[in-house]
Structures are given as structure tokens and as C-alpha cells.
Amino acid sequence: MNKSENLYQQAQKHIPGGVNSPVRAFKGVGGTPIFFKSANGPYLYDEDDKQYIDYVGSWGPMILGHNHEAVIEAVQQQLKNGLSFGAPTALEIQMADKVCQMVPSMDQVRMVNSGTEATMSAIRLARGYTGRDKIVKFEGCYHGHADSLLVKAGSGALTLGVPTSPGVPADLANHTITLSFNDLDEVETVFKEIGEQIACIIVEPVAGNMNCIPPVPGFLEGLRRVCDQHGSVLIFDEVMTGFRVAKGGAQAFYNVTPDLTALGKIIGGGMPVGAFGGKQAIMDHLAPTGPVYQAGTLSGNPVAMAAGLATLQQLEQLGFYEKLTTTTSKLTAGLTELANSHGIDFTTQQVGGMFGLFFTTDKEITSYQQAASCNLEQFKAFFHAMLEQGVYLAPSAFEAGFVSITHTNAVIEKTLAAASVAFSKL
Ligand code: PMP
């Protein structure tokens, strides 16, 4: 038994399922989760000292690679000054100024502690601002685990939402309408019927929780138009895409401006941070200025702000996103070429530094149904063959992959060599 297997057994005793977040349990791919003890640059090291090239990057935050000098130093400096004050700090102003400068649709931003808090609070604010209860989301998009968002579609566009988890009241799920990602006609039909009841649309502008599915041309623009016509708030959940697909997020990449934006992951540089913000007229409704309540003991935590700020500063270096995108393209193009040469039905999708791998005959994937009908058995076999060779992919066929700026050409070449072996085994 290796150390991870041993630790996984121990973990089951006092940790539900042995993990603190379900996807870590390897349920989607089978086998035992790897327990890591350190990381550096593009590499993770497990408890048995095996090295892995990391394409999870803590599910997105580690865009600079692990242990980036400037980030570690900023955290160490702040540690000497204290861990938490529960009172305002100058660092929070620097963070807010930086975020609003990098994401121009945001006039103001409130810091929170996770992506879940960010989307949950943005929805409460949209409801408080509009005085409406219903929200629209899309099948296959994930926005964290707040009650209103753990809801799937009923049998038709206008039927009642159904909770995806026990513990979510049906009365609450009723207010969530789940539509098909990339299907603007469906959105327009629903808004024609009940637009005046809809507080907001929340969308991942590039879906990253059903593999990696970019918006089809006109989809995001259409959502903007529909929201404007009906006085609803457009929320971009950029927890994953923010600072990942471009410096200003997917809204900069696609040039569509939301009313509110939820952020997480990269904004904390690896510390637990989320944020939401947007137009002044809407943010004015948030406490303490306005009546919509939202709060947090550790929100704007100085150590987390130091890590996040140091990370954001690095992203402003000239050519950062060009380099990240080129590296990611080299990986996806290389994988596709290898799969073809091994006769495997396979395709990839990519936006900036995020990518998806699909075992399918389809050339382009635009819907949840297509993503869901990919060959899961092939993905599992590929995942384990890569893992064995020291390449750590997301342990689920429905998660996007992430590249960091420390993934050099040599690292990509090493990954492709492993992939050639993995494809040959399928
Ligand atoms: N929104 C999106 C788009 C996400 O990808 C995630 C997490 N993967 C969340 C929200 C929730 O963030 P957290 O896990 O930090 O609560």
C-alpha cells in the first residue's frame, strides 16, 4: 500500500468520505485520491515523493505556478503584521482598486471567502435590487453550492426547477429556471413569457464545469440584450474565467459587459478568496450603504489580500496571456495530433489558459448533452495512464484543465510523450 492509499483509509475516520470537497475523492475516475505534500512551479509532489505535472492548479488559482516567489514573499511579509483584524486595512483598498482597474465593468467590489459566497451574494443582490425572485441559470454550469444554484431543469423550459441535492427546499428550487447553455432561443422564449419576474441571469461565460465549452457567437451578446429589454441583471460567474482567459476575464475576451461579476480562485492566489461587484447603481443596494445584507468575519483577510494582490500584479506583465495561450494551444494541438495518429476519436477546446479534453466523434462541443455523451471509459483509462506517468489531470471528465505560466515547452513535451503512451493503451 502506498502512502496515499494509507492516508485515504485514515482520512475516512473523521472526514466525510475522506475529503473536504467531493470531486477530490476520484469518484469520477475510480481509484484512490493522491495525497500531496508540496508543490513547485508546474509540479506537485505526493506523500511518496512522486512528481506530477499539474494541470489542475488547485482548480484554477495557481496561474503563476506553485510557490511563486513574489506571492510567497508578500504572504510572509503580511504574516509578520498579523493574521486577521476584522477591521479595515489599506490592503483591501489596493485590492479593490486593482480589481476595478483590471475588470472595467466593476465600479465597486466586495471581498468574500469563496466562489460560492460570491455567486450566492451576487444573486441576493440582484434579487434585492430588482425586487424579483426568479433566476435563470444554465444546465451544466456550476456556480458553487448555494441552495438556489443546486437546481436542475424540470422537463420543459418553464417547468419548476428540481433540487439536485436533498436539503434544498423545493419551494426555493421553484424560483430557479434552468435553461440550455448556448441556446438563445430558449432564453428569449422564457423572457417573453415571464421576463418581468426574472431578477437575473447567471452564466459561466465559458462553461468550465462541464469540461470546457465556449459560448457560441451571439450567445453572451443575446443574454445582454434580453436582460436590458426586461430590466434583469446579467451576472457573469467569472470565478473560473476571471484573470484566466484574459486579463479582464471572459467579458474582455468576448467584449460583453455584465452588470455584476463573481470572482474567485486566481483573485486569492491560492488563499480562500472570492469577490463580487459591478455597477455602482446596483452595488449601492448592498449593506452598509443599502438594505441587502451580506457580511464576513474573515472577508478581506490581510494575508489572503497580500497573496491575491501579488498574483494580480504578475498578470500585468507584458505578454503574459499571449504566452499562457500559446502554451495551452501547444498542449491541446499536440494531444489532438497524437490522438489522431492513434486512431482515437478525440477533440479539445481551449480559451486562453483553460482547456477541455473530449473523447468523442464530434468536432465541436457546444452543449451539455454533447459533453455528457462523451466516452467516459476512455477518459478514465487515459486519466489513469497519465497519472501513472506523472501527469495530474482533473479527476473528472467534466472539469476544465488549467495551464500555468511555469509550464514550459519542455513540460508540455514531457506531457505529450506521456499522452502518446496513454493513447496507445486505449
Ligand atoms: N463558480 C464557478 C464557475 C466555479 O468553477 C466554482 C468552483 N469550481 C464556483 C463558482 C464555486 O467556488 P468555490 O468552490 O470557491 O466555492
Image (tube, rainbow, N blue to C red):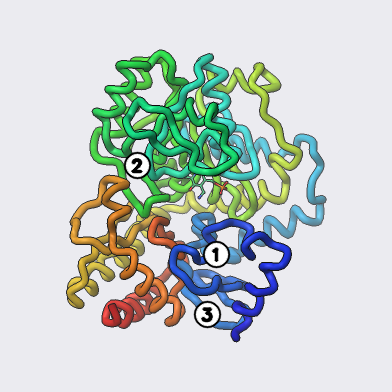
- Residue where numbered disc 3 is placed: 51
Sequence order check, earlier mark of 2 and 3: 3
Q: Position of residue 401 (x, y in %)?
A: 41, 60
Query: SS class of the residue under badge 3?
Result: strand
Query: SS class of the residue under badge 2?
Result: helix
- Residue where numbered disc 1 is placed: 25
Sequence order check, earlier mark of 1 and 2: 1
Along the horizontal axis of the image, is 242 left or right of 288? left
Label 1 – label 2 distance at C-alpha: 34 Å
Q: Position of residue 128 (x, y in %)?
A: 57, 19
Question: Where is 189 relative to 377, above or below?
Answer: above
**Residue at the spot x=28%, y=38% of the render?**
182
Seen from the viewer's position, the closer of residues 416 and 388 is 388
**Residue at the spot x=65%, y=17% of the render?**
290
Where is the C terminus found, in terms of image quarters? Answer: bottom left
What's the mark number on residue 253? 2
Sequence order check, earlier mark of 1 and 3: 1
Q: Position of residue 167 (x, y in %)?
A: 60, 40
Question: Where is 211 relative to 54, above or below?
Answer: above
